[in-house]
């Protein structure tokens, strides 16, 4: 009950100022006829669909949504994305309920997102990223999306939970699904903004008879808010599709390059608080470059109206080089990572009859990974910090049965099984000052079959309200050199395993009338043998409990004003710590804000004008398992955008962090909270971007 009161109070604090301000301005403007119109509109009876999806933006821009998932499914459409201008594409997720952004300010390793009480710190996998159905996670689990610009994205879907049978590897807490544009259109956009930022985006889509072609290009270069933050990125993509009588065949190619000849680095607390635009003294030689290459083939065959088959196969390469020196490090460390992924994803759908449906699928992902990290130590000796060359393969198969016994009830049950195997191509090297090229015994992890039941259910309590529930099992896997079953420090054999997660969620989606939709849910997720990665090395936590409340709404007040908002409250605790750290019992897990919230307002005074206001809030978090050293990371940021439609396109002005608030990301390489071990990365201050978009007919 106390948790519910906190959530209600937080919602009230977020909503009252906006609603009060609106009321004062609009009472005098509304005419009697408009008032009457709204009263009648409020009385309309509206039916809610048998799903739990909340869409932010135009529903007609949603290309595909999995409505068999009961839980927190949120979709952001193109009209809510295309006016955003970000250096790191993952920042587009900031509006999504319960998504936390970790802003590292580390050049090519700059931003990560996380959900459901998992942290984006370090390299701890927690969610699967899919672009047009193809995995886009690095071997470490980090999400990679910088090969796309907003103009090329049709919509983004976020599912939070453990009940999606279609994903296994990295889908510990859910998944992110990005769909690129495949529509007909011709668009060119130019922008200039703060910190000498220049940007160009373009899109071309055309369909002639049975042939469709789509192209996108993006370029961005700027200096950044902090000193020593020059960055440049380019993205290119093409897609070609042939339509046949009963099938379609498409080839997709994507390329992205992100060059960061400078990176501002982490800095001590005193410097961060007094000189937030500065560069850390230890980071003067930090830099990095990453490159992404992608090819995929997509085939869909429709046997008839009730049976269809989808097959995707892909090849992609992620190549990254980074030079970095953290606070307290003796010298710059050179880090090289290269990953070549190949895979296949197949799915068969069969609508048996109006009441029953069946779906089955198989996926295999192979990663060929090479890691090489080296650094000169304090006495001038070059130490190979990490050297590994290995192959990792994940295979998964699932079967799902769906039933709609009556028109107000729908459920589905699935079983998924995954198998993970890793094989080293040479012994792993983890050097020390005493032995700079020390080889350690190498025996990589080979998992038993991981069986995961999944369940989703929907029930219409009335024409306006749907009760939804889900339950399922997922897993968290080790990555990189942590797949080795010999301890890096002692050389002793230490068997490793996946961490099993069991979760459930119960919620209510409501359409109160034609203008107001809400969704509220309570969720819980328990894990056994959980671990975290800190700077690439495994550290066991033990048994953990995550639980929280999610609430979201969208409200069309009238033809001029619309609102949307969301809030997520999260509790993430260590219930039974690993025997190595008994003092962690009952402590909060590192890097997890106690709440996130967003509030948006759109004002359309005329068909040619649109104004938007976005308030984004995040609570504070502990930076280590000891819960020492205090809590950091809380912020409230306000952004705004104005669009003016012309006869050739539109002009847009975007303002971020309007009130120039200080905010920061804080990371601890230890579990002690000692101030000299904390690393601070201040966020960007007030900044602007002016763009002109030309729409060719």
Image (cartoon, helix red, strand yellow):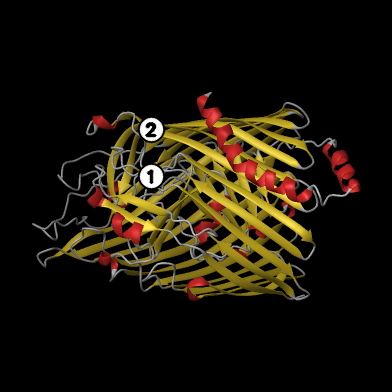
Q: Nearer the viewer, residue 609 or 541?
A: 609
Q: Which residue is mark 2?
A: 573
**Residue sticking out furthest to the top:** 1
Q: Position of residue 58 (x, y in %)?
A: 72, 54
Q: Nearer the viewer, residue 334 or 312?
A: 334
Horizontal side of residue 498 vs 251, given as left or right: left
Q: Is residue 53 above or below residue 320?
A: above
Q: CA distance from mark 2 to mark 1?
A: 12 Å
Q: Quadrant of residue 638?
A: bottom right
Regarding residue 312, the answer to whether it shows in the image is: yes
Q: Which label sits on residue 433?
A: none
Disc 2 crowd rating (10 Å Cα; few below 14, some 14-19, many 20+) is many
> Residue at (26%, 42%) from the top-left corner?
671
Q: Position of residue 23 (x, y in %)?
A: 74, 45
Q: Which residue is mark 1?
A: 591
Horizontal side of residue 419 vs 410, given as left or right: left
**Residue sticking out furthest to the right:** 33
Q: Quadrant of the C terminus?
A: bottom right
Disc 1 crowd rating (10 Å Cα; few below 14, some 14-19, many 20+) is many
Q: Nearer the viewer, residue 408 or 190?
A: 190
Horizontal side of residue 284 vs 141, given as left or right: left
> Which secondary structure, mark 1?
loop
- Sequence order check: which comes first, mark 2 or mark 1? 2
Q: Quadrant of residue 172?
A: top left
Q: Quadrant of residue 549?
A: top right
Q: Position of residue 165 (x, y in %)?
A: 54, 40
> Which secondary structure, mark 2?
strand
Q: Position of residue 392 (x, y in %)?
A: 36, 52
């Amino acid at each position: 009950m106390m948790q519910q009161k906190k959530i209600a109070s937080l919602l009230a604090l977020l909503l009252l100022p906006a609603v009060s301000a609106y009321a004062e301005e609009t009472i005098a403007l509304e005419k009697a006829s408009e008032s009457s119109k709204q009263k009648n509109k409020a009385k309309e009876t509206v039916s809610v669909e048998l799903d739990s999806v909340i869409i932010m933006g135009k529903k007609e821009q949603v290309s595909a949504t999995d409505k068999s998932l009961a839980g927190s499914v949120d979709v952001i459409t193109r009209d809510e994305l295309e006016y955003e201008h970000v250096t790191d594409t993952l920042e587009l997720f900031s509006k999504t309920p319960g998504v936390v952004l970790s802003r590292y300010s580390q050049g090519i390793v700059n931003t990560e997102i996380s959900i459901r009480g998992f942290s984006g710190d370090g390299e701890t996998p927690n969610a699967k990223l899919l672009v047009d159905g193809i995995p886009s996670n690095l071997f470490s689990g980090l999400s990679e999306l910088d090969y796309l610009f907003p103009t090329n994205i049709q919509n983004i879907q976020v599912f939070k939970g453990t009940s999606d049978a279609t994903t296994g590897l990295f889908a510990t807490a859910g998944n992110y699904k990005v769909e690129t544009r495949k529509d007909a259109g011709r668009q060119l956009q130019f922008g200039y903004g703060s910190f000498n930022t220049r940007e160009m985006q373009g899109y071309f889509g055309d369909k002639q008879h049975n042939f469709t072609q789509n192209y996108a290009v993006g370029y961005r270069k700027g200096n950044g808010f902090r000193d020593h933050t020059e960055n440049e990125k380019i993205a290119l993509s093409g897609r070609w599709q042939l339509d046949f009588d009963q099938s379609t065949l498409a080839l997709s190619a994507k390329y992205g390059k992100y060059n960061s000849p400078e990176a501002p680095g982490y800095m001590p607390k005193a410097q961060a608080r007094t000189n937030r635009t500065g560069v850390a003294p230890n980071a003067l030689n930090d830099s990095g470059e990453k490159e992404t290459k992608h090819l995929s083939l997509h085939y869909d065959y429709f046997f008839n109206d009730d049976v269809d088959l989808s097959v995707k196969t892909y090849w992609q390469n992620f190549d990254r080089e980074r030079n970095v020196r953290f606070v307290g490090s003796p010298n710059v460390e050179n880090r090289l990572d290269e990953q070549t992924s190949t895979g296949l994803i197949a799915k068969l759908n069969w609508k048996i009859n109006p009441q029953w449906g069946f779906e089955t699928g198989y996926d295999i992902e192979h990663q060929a990974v090479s890691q090489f990290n080296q650094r000169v130590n304090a006495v001038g000796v070059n130490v190979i910090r990490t050297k590994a060359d290995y192959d990792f393969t994940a295979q998964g198969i699932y079967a799902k049965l769906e039933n709609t016994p009556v028109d107000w009830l729908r459920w589905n049950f699935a079983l998924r099984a995954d198998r993970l195997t890793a094989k080293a191509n040479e012994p792993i090297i983890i050097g020390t000052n005493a032995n700079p090229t020390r080889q350690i015994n190498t025996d990589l992890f080979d998992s038993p079959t991981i069986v995961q039941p999944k369940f989703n259910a929907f029930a219409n309590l009335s024409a306006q309200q749907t009760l939804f529930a889900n339950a399922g099992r997922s897993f968290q896997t080790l990555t990189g050199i942590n797949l080795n079953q010999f301890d890096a420090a002692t050389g002793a054999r230490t068997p490793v395993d996946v961490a099993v997660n069991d979760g459930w969620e119960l919620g209510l989606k409501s359409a109160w009338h034609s203008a107001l939709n809400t969704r509220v849910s309570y969720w819980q997720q328990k894990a056994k043998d959980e671990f975290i990665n800190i700077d690439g090395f495994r550290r066991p936590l033990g048994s953990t409990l995550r639980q929280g409340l999610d609430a979201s709404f969208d409200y069309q007040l009238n033809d001029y004003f619309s609102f949307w908002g969301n809030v997520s409250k999260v509790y993430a605790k260590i219930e039974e710590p690993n025997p190595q750290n008994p003092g962690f019992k009952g402590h909060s897990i590192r890097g997890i804000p106690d709440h996130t919230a967003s509030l948006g307002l759109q004002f359309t005074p005329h068909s040619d004008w649109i104004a938007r206001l976005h308030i984004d809030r995040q609570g504070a978090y502990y930076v280590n398992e000891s819960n020492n050293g205090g809590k950091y990371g809380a912020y409230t940021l306000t952004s705004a955008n104005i669009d003016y439609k012309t006869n050739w396109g539109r002009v847009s002005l975007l303002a971020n962090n309007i009130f120039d608030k200080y905010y920061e990301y804080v990371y601890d390489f230890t579990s002690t909270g000692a101030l000299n071990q904390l690393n601070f990365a201040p966020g960007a201050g007030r900044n602007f971007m002016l763009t002109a978009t030309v729409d060719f007919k």
